[in-house]
Amino acid sequence: MIIGIIINTSEPETVWNAFRFGTTSLLNDHEVKIFLLGRGVESENIRDEKFNVQEQIKLFMGNSGKIFACGTCLKARQMVGSEVCPISTMHDLLHIVEESNRILTFG
């Protein structure tokens, strides 16, 4: 199954859980793509003692998870793309929605 996940928040526990679910899905032989939208593009910068978002992002990427980040949302925050937040477009999001068997949103 192909699973698309949209993260539209920078709230630590929610982002942490989204990446945990993504990694669990990958480990169960599903393909997973995460699109960071709105405040979700701030995920790479979340630092929280209780919810280690950075660790979950590394696990997700280490298990072949794919991440996309809204370029317009990055620009609005004066941020640039990175390995974790590669600049993507609404066309990329549309493609994820079209090809996915399931779409989940967090945020």
Image (tube, rainbow, N blue to C red):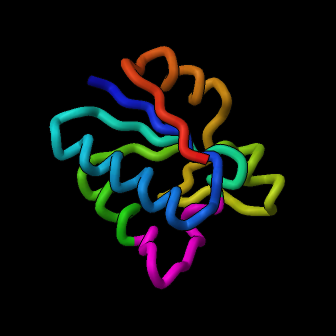
- Marks counted in the figure total 0
Residue 89: give x, y in percent of width and height. 66, 34
Name the residue at 55% across, 50% down: 86
Quadrant of the frame with the N terminus: top left
Name the foreground residue: 106 vs 34.
106
Q: Which residue sits furthest top?
A: 98
Residue 22: give x, y in percent of width and height. 34, 46
Tell me if residue 11 comes above or below residue 101 in the rendering. below
Residue 17: give x, y in percent of width and height. 42, 56
Q: Is residue 52 magenta?
A: yes
Q: Which residue sits furthest bottom?
A: 49
Name the foreground residue: 86 vs 20.
20
Residue 77: give x, y in percent of width and height. 80, 60
**Image quadrant where residue 47 sits:** bottom right
**Image quadrant where residue 19 sits:** bottom left
Q: Is residue 25 magenta?
A: no
Name the residue at 50% across, 64% down: 13
**Magenta residues, as a range?**
42-54
Q: Which residue sits furthest left?
A: 28
Name the foreground residue: 45 vs 87.
45
Tell me if residue 25 comes above or below residue 55 in the rendering. above
Name the residue at 46% across, 27% down: 103
Does residue 67 appear to the left or right of 76 in the view shown? left
